[in-house]
């Protein structure tokens, strides 16, 4: 029931939001078309401004993964994870998640397919994927768009969020699914 | 900090590639990674243009200011450095709402708009302001009601109950959001002033 309602929200939200903006603008006598063009003009510059930041990040992350450095790091961290109650197979996912959304999703999909979506591993991988965020990608894009190179405590906060999400997903999955 | 992470990723990757005999693959990846970065930006152009146009209408109609006014009790605590009814607050609230509902492609344009507005009141434009750090902490730890992508993957893999992971996801993201906000406030109000005084001595 709940998931049907939630799915409906995600389909309807954007068209409804557009209607609200347009009707409200029209009612307030905003020249809607002109205003749209004026706001939209910035879109290109903002997207292009991010390019150097994203190239720097993507190159580093992809090289780290393809070269096998990621697997070495995963093997080093595996004992810590098994103490917490997570199978070592999910470690590449945990390490990849803050760095790259598409790679992490690839790893999660592979785990779910290999071990089955209703296995403990499949469920844990699903929850981990939903709980943590691609912190580096978000910081790179957001700070890059305004040209900021010094992130101060934003990076630490983002990584704490990922770590908390990771530990909580392991804990909750052990509690609910075992 | 970022310097160090970037160096470790790149040098560690190249070194590991040399050790495992994958150096050829590393060379190829250097260039394909660069292309991929540009491709992500190109994909963003259409999305950003559409949403920024729509957002401008909402702003001119006074909707963004109105939303900022409604959420004033919350934003006063989270963003003490941002003036009330500043357009940044409206954009931040819309970004977080989009994130909670799992509307990823709407969240990014709202978020970039928020960053642009925050940058206008940033006393040191080369460095992240406190408000930016708080905003990004909220953004990356954000409560997720609908982990739509992963539910799709589970359906495709033939799960008997694809949405059973929704409850733990909501609980875990809710908790981590609260924890990160508390750590941020604790750092800003207590720990940092103490740390600065300590450094001066």
Image: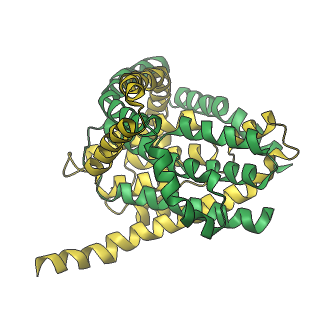
Chain colours: A green, B yellow
Question: Taking the image as drawn, is residue A116 in sight?
Answer: yes
Along the line of sight, which residue is nearer the eye, A19 or B32? B32
Q: Is residue A81 above or below residue B62?
A: below
Q: Is residue A14 left or right of residue A73?
A: right
Along the line of sight, which residue is nearer the eye, A97 or B188? A97
Along the line of sight, which residue is nearer the eye, B125 or B62? B125
Residue A161 in the image: x percent, y percent? Answer: 50, 59
Which image quarter is the C terminus of chain B in? bottom left
Q: Quadrant of residue B148?
A: top right
Residue displayed at 51% across by 68% down? B179
Which image quarter is the N terminus of chain B in? bottom left
Residue B153 in the image: x percent, y percent? Answer: 73, 37
Tally of numbered tags: 0
Question: Taking the image as drawn, is residue B151 in sight?
Answer: no
Q: Is residue A141 left or right of residue B63?
A: left
Residue displayed at 70% across by 54% down? A124
Q: Is residue A18 above or below residue A116?
A: above
Q: Is residue A159 left or right of residue B101?
A: left
Residue B51 in the image: x percent, y percent? Answer: 49, 28
In the orientation shown, which residue stands out farthest toward the left? B201
Along the line of sight, which residue is nearer the eye, A105 or B180? A105
Residue B88 in the image: x percent, y percent? Answer: 39, 46
């Amino acid at each position: 029931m709940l998931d049907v309602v939630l799915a409906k929200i995600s389909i309807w939200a954007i068209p409804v939001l557009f209607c609200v903006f347009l009707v409200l603008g029209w009612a307030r006598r905003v020249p809607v078309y002109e205003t749209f063009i004026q706001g939209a003009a910035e879109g290109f510059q903002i997207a292009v401004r991010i390019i150097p930041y994203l190239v720097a990040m993507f190159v580093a992350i992809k090289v780290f993964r393809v070269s096998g450095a990621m697997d070495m790091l995963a093997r080093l961290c595996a004992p810590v994870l098994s103490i917490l109650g997570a199978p070592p197979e999910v470690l590449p996912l945990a390490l990849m998640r803050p760095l790259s959304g598409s790679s992490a999703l690839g790893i999660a999909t592979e785990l779910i397919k290999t071990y089955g979506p209703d296995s403990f591993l499949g469920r844990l991988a699903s929850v981990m994927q939903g709980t943590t965020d691609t912190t580096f990608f978000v910081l790179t894009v957001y700070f890059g768009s305004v040209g900021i190179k010094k992130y101060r405590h934003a990076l630490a906060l983002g990584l704490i969020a990922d770590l908390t999400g990771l530990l909580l997903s392991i804990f909750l999955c052990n509690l609910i699914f075992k | 900090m970022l310097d160090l992470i970037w160096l470790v990723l790149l040098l560690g990757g190249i070194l590991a590639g040399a050790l495992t005999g994958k150096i050829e693959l590393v060379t190829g990846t250097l260039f394909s990674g660069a292309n991929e970065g540009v491709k992500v930006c190109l994909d963003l152009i259409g999305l950003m243009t559409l949403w920024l146009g729509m957002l401008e209408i909402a702003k001119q109609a006074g909707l963004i200011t109105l939303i900022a006014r409604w959420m004033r009790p919350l934003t006063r605590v989270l963003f003490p450095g941002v003036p009330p009814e500043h357009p940044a607050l409206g954009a931040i609230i819309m970004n977080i709402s989009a994130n909670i509902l799992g509307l990823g492609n709407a969240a990014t344009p709202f978020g970039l708009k928020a960053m642009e507005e925050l940058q206008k009141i940033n006393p040191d434009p080369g460095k992240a302001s406190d408000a930016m750090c708080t905003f990004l902490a909220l953004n990356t730890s954000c409560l997720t009601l609908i982990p739509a992508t992963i539910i799709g993957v589970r359906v495709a893999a033939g799960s008997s109950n694809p949405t059973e992971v929704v409850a733990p996801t909501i609980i875990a993201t809710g908790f981590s959001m609260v924890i990160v906000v508390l750590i941020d406030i604790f750092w800003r109000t207590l720990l940092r002033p103490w740390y600065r005084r300590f450094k001066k001595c």
